[in-house]
Image: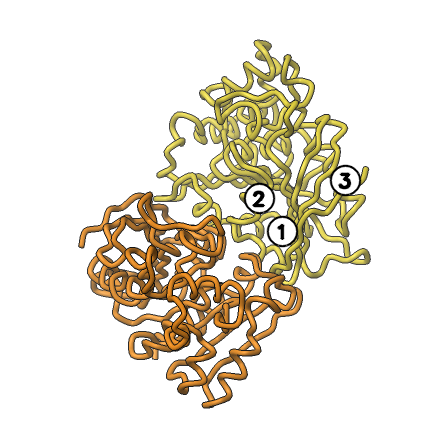
Chain colours: A orange, B yellow
């Protein structure tokens, strides 16, 4: 597994770098970004927060707009941001912004024409961490976070792989995708009509099935234009109560769905993850 | 002078807002952005830092990428980011990224076809502050900062209008535009061949003419690809010594020309300006 460096910039004494690599899982060339804090060395491998972005994003949105590096440098946490879908001219796409490229939904597709490339669940849980741990001064300690579609990804991946992560957080997650237009469109296309498969990629359904083994922090702006139709944090909270899962949902008055919202609270998410990564 | 709100987002308890307005000075419709800290009210008007961006930028680059709002909210400073040139279909342009739209150089053009719209010096020093002070809970206390072409703008505008500002800072400024390709191309087009006019828009020339009446802080990355050919901070420093001007130039090892660099030191610039704004 070789990776190719395509950019680097010093930031807060650490480094932001972008790499491309051929993905065996996704069957295409992919780009990811990593922030390495100043204290990361071979003799001092640091824990990693994986960040999953939302619809239409690449590895760049969070890295450029979240303002996360000051705190991550201070806490000694690396951050890895994958792309949000497979990429390339031969990858199936849709004219909508909410399906196809930029909209991989962090699942393994079972349906043509999507299944050949859209295996983002395996990419994020297997191939990417192996690549990161083989090439950078990081430990195996991981936490996971994300925004919107990426909040859905962080919740479902963290819940299903509790042994691999220490903590989960999300901003404005798609909390119950089976019950919202974004999720229904994507699941229909990528997964077909088998609802038992859908349930395995729905955070609220997973919390109804079993108690979460990891602590979960969720921030949601109450002025978010997608709140009622698409995000449904109340479903997540209700599902958490079924088995007494540790889900802290904070409704943040006046905040919307943008990176201005994320930047306002990312320090608190980093501190939350640091607490669990440094146990 | 009416302004129209086109976006707003809560951030760090304050607000980021964008507005459009008809500019009498620039003879076109313009957009600017403002950050208002949480403590800004009519009964508690706050000081303003004007931020001038670099080549190809709009009002959005700094606001989205600098990570400035946490500290600005804490210090109680508003930030205003104008666009970098006049805009619109009837505004003269050039196919280069370093002339025409996105490259106004914060001067008043005297040459056809530019002079009809390219009056960014008057816009930034007169029309925009009047608009801001008439429409927002801000005081008349102002400081000025910027990056690259905007660093040139901040230095020249601050030096020539010492009574209007309290302090000046810059990241990677074009320090001696008469002696670099970016500056020579722009000054030739906008100002013609009269070198005495050029000198009025060159920070190093201004510092040779007279002692700076304001304190100046400059950060420059030593891994900046534009450093030697375009930026020339050593000329600024030498010019500052002619009359003993208070110019602090900090060479930052390993940093480049990007917003990752700006984000790493913006808190220190905000603290520098706050010290002088709150005297």
Q: Would you say B8 lies left or right of A202 here? A: right
- Residue at position x 40%, y 44% from top? B252
- Residue at position x 77%, y 52% from top? B137
Tell me where residue B65 appears, x and y as whole percent: 51, 49
Label 1 and label 2: CA atoms lie apart by 26 Å
**Which of labels 3 and 1 is toward the front?**
3
Task: Count residues near mark 3 (Cα–Cα under 10 Å), then give few for <14, some for 14-19, many for 20+.
Answer: some
Q: Which residue has dot 2 on it?
A: B60
Which of B114/A232 is in front? A232
Question: Where A120 sits versus B258, above or below?
Answer: below
Which of A201/B98 is in front? A201
Q: Which residue has dot 1 on it?
A: B275
Please report contact status of discs 1 and 2: CB closer than 8 Å, yes or no.
Answer: no
Q: Quadrant of the C terminus of chain A?
A: bottom left
Tell me the element at label 2.
helix
Please report contact status of discs 3 and 1: CB closer than 8 Å, yes or no.
Answer: no
State whether residue A273 appears in this view: no
Question: Where A183 sits versus B252, above or below?
Answer: below
Q: Which mark is residue B131?
A: 3
**In the picture, residue B103 is in which quadrant?**
top right
């Amino acid at each position: 597994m070789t990776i190719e460096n395509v950019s680097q910039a010093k930031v807060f004494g650490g480094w932001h770098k972008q790499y491309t690599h051929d993905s065996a899982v996704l069957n295409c060339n992919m780009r990811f970004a990593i922030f390495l804090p100043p204290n990361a060395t071979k003799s001092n491998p640091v824990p990693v927060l994986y960040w999953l972005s939302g619809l239409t994003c690449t590895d760049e949105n969070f890295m450029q707009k979240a303002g996360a590096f000051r705190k991550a440098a201070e806490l000694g946490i690396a951050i890895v941001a994958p792309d949000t879908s497979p990429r390339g001219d031969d990858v199936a796409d849709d004219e909508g912004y909410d399906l196809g490229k930029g909209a991989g939904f962090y699942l393994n597709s079972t349906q043509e024409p999507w299944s050949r490339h859209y295996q983002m669940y395996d990419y994020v849980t297997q191939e990417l961490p192996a690549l990161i741990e083989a090439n950078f001064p990081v430990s195996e300690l991981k936490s996971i976070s994300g925004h919107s579609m990426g909040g859905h990804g962080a919740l479902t991946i963290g819940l299903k792989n509790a042994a691999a992560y220490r903590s989960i957080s999300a901003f404005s997650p798609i909390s119950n995708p089976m019950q919202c237009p974004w999720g229904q469109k994507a699941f229909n296309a990528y997964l077909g009509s088998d609802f038992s498969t859908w349930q395995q990629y729905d955070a609220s359904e997973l919390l109804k099935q079993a108690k979460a083994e990891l602590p979960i922090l969720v921030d949601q702006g109450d002025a978010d234009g997608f709140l009622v139709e698409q995000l449904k944090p109340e479903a997540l909270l209700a599902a958490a109560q079924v088995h007494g899962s540790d889900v802290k949902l904070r409704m943040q008055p006046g905040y919307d769905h943008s990176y201005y919202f994320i930047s306002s609270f990312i320090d608190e998410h980093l501190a939350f993850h640091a607490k669990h990564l440094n146990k």
